[in-house]
Image (cartoon, rainbow, N blue to C red):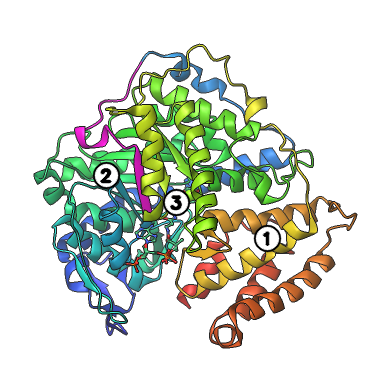
């Protein structure tokens, strides 16, 4: 997409909003007067509250750092024991047995819509490095997809892409509340990226979506409390009122992917009861959040990343509690992502499909109503599993798990057994290095060693090392994990990555810069909240 420096800031009538991003070819269709004035209105109403919500996160973290453990809240016990249900699930969201996810690149959007699954989660979050150009281009791609007008010809191969099946339901995932959008200022302050993504997708598409019997549907990531859910409920109600829509027209699915959020799932459903249709087990961010939230607790250190699978008691408890909570309230309980991606080698691919089948079977047997796949090559496998459990469907809402013993805080927080190995540490370093390099170069999702890596999975790698250093762990071979050991390994693994990717790719890429960022945040005394925050500075400078 063409991009030129913006000569003058794009300002609206009352000039509380200034857009400073470089001009792109998508501006005329995305940054329209109507969309920008809606964004401005949202910022006028809601932007100021976001720093307060983030501050509440910091305050709670201080208590946990001081020794408290997360727990169910006394002050909301009446919500948990109350007899209430969510408003409704529209007919096109009743059956979500397999959802494909992916960034909003034009080709990927078309391929995802052709994957033969129920839903495409179009991602402005974990799998997108949010450069201004990609954001605008992504919004344009979704506008075209909603209107059935999306086509693409690959410049390298000449292959033409178009959508063959318009039955796939579109759900847009907006950025988390922690991520600013540096290219838009409201009264001189950067705005929350989430408001930008929401405003642009909603404004440009709600009429067309409703006209074809669907609606403006969103995935909301990384919530940490029901107070944040309340903020989203206000945003949705405001948008519905402004455009004279029935309350509850906007529908959302919230990812439960932070440790604090698992203790307020009822409360999140309650706050959003007009708009919410489902919760989703965002397992990768959840594991990252377990490390981050319990950073000061030496008895909760995770082993090698490969050991931390959904069969671990703390993750199994999380999946089962999410299902039980959702189904009691009439909401769907979505499973998450197995990060395996297909291999071109048939034998290796058979092993991948077997692992995916195993993972999806566990989810479907627990009672999840659907699951995520990262690649079209996994659609048939995931569908076969969920078809086997759901049949004609549409879902497994009847599985109430009422006979289960209550799931207690101790189970959700249970330490995770397993070794910390030198091989595991070196692998974490190589993954974090390569992912950071991709992200700061503008690519938020990459295949590394047969796995899909995105902003959630890579966070596990880099925070595991931080945690092992912080708590002076010994690896299984007796080596003590120190900053010095990490620096030594970082240098060695950087060379290994150079060998793996080749000298030319290495010199053209940003590996040295990525290594230096990784070195800085892994050896910092305080855990940096998100890799993507310092990453965003590099991406946008
Ligand atoms: C923790 C979480 O948040 S999970 C959710 C966020 N993460 C994601 O959504 C991951 C999405 N997946 C991806 O981005 C990709 O699968 C990757 C980057 C991991 C691998 O992509 P590639 O290297 O292109 O894989 P590969 O070469 O096997 O792709 C084959 C084809 O499938 C397409 N494809 C791969 N993944 C997807 C996808 N998720 N959606 C649509 N199409 C896809 C490719 O575009 C390619 O199409 P082509 O043959 O027409 O060129
Ligand atoms: O967003 C999903 C996750 O696993 O993280
Ligand atoms: Mg996530």
Q: Secondary structure at mark 1?
A: helix
Q: Is residue 96 magenta?
A: yes
> Depth check: 476 or 464 in front?
476
Q: Is residue 193 magenta?
A: no
Question: What range of the chain is rendered magenta?
Answer: 84-101
Disc 3: CA contacts within 10 A as few (<14), some (14-19) or many (>=20): many
Foreground tag (1 vs 3):
1
Disc 1: CA contacts within 10 A as few (<14), some (14-19) or many (>=20): many
| Left or right: 319 in relation to 236 | right
- Count the labels in the image: 3
* The N terminus lies in quadrant: bottom left
Label 1 sits on residue: 428
Label 2 sits on residue: 217
> Depth check: 364 or 321 in front?
364
Q: Position of residue 238 (x, y in %)?
A: 24, 42
Location of residue 106 with respect to 47 vertically, above or below: below
Q: Quadrant of residue 110?
A: bottom left
Residue sitting at x 31%, y 25%: 86
**Pointer 3 and pointer 2: residues touching (CB < 8 Å)?**
no
Q: Position of residue 92 (x, y in %)?
A: 21, 37
């Amino acid at each position: 997409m063409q991009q030129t420096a913006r000569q003058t800031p794009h300002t609206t009538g009352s000039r509380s909003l200034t857009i400073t991003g470089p001009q792109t070819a998508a501006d005329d269709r995305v940054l329209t007067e109507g969309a920008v004035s809606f964004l401005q209105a949202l910022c006028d109403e809601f932007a100021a509250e976001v720093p307060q919500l983030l501050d509440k996160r910091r305050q709670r973290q201080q208590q946990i750092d001081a020794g408290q453990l997360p727990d169910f809240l006394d002050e909301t016990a009446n919500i948990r024991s109350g007899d209430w249900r969510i408003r409704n699930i529209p007919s096109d969201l009743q059956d979500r047995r397999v959802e494909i996810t992916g960034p909003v690149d034009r080709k990927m959007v078309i391929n995802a819509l052709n994957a033969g699954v129920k839903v495409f989660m179009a991602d402005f979050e974990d799998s997108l490095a949010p450069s201004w150009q990609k954001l605008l281009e992504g919004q344009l791609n979704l506008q075209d997809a909603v209107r059935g007008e999306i086509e693409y010809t690959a410049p390298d191969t000449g292959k033409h892409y178009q959508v063959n099946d318009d039955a796939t339901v579109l759900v847009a995932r907006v950025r988390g509340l922690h991520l600013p959008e540096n290219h838009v200022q409201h009264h001189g302050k950067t705005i929350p990226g989430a408001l930008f993504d929401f405003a642009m997708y909603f404004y440009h598409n709600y009429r067309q979506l409703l006209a074809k019997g669907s609606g403006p549907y969103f995935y909301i990531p990384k919530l940490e409390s029901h107070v944040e859910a309340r903020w989203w409920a206000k945003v949705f109600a405001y948008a519905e009122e402004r455009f004279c829509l029935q309350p509850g027209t906007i529908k959302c699915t919230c990812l439960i992917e932070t440790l604090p959020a698992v203790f307020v799932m009822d409360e999140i459903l309650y706050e959003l009861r007009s708009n919410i249709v489902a919760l989703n087990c965002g397992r990768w961010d959840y594991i990252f959040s377990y490390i981050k939230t319990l950073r000061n607790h030496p008895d909760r250190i995770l082993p090698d990343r490969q050991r931390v699978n959904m069969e671990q008691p703390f993750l199994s408890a999380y999946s089962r509690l999410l299902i039980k909570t959702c189904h009691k309230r009439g909401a769907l309980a979505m499973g998450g992502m197995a990060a395996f991606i297909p291999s071109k080698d048939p034998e290796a691919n058979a092993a991948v499909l077997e692992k995916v089948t195993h993972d999806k079977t566990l989810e479907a047997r627990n009672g999840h109503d659907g699951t995520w796949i990262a690649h079209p090559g996994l659609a048939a496998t995931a569908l076969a599993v969920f078809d086997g459990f759901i049949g004609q469907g549409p879902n497994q809402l009847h599985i109430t798990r009422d006979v289960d013993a209550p799931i207690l805080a101790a189970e959700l927080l249970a330490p995770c057994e397993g070794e910390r190995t030198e091989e595991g540490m070196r692998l974490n370093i190589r993954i974090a290095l390569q992912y950071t390099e991709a992200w700061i170069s503008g690519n938020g999702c990459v295949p590394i060693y047969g796995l899909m890596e995105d902003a959630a999975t890579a966070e596990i790698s880099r925070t595991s090392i931080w945690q092992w250093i912080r708590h002076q762990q010994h690896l299984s071979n007796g080596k003590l994990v120190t900053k010095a050991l990490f620096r030594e390994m970082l240098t060695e693994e950087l060379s290994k990555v150079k060998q793996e990717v080749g000298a030319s790719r290495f010199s053209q890429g940003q590996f040295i810069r990525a290594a230096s960022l990784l070195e800085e945040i892994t050896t910092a005394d305080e855990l940096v909240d998100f890799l993507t925050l310092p990453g965003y500075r590099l991406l946008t400078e």
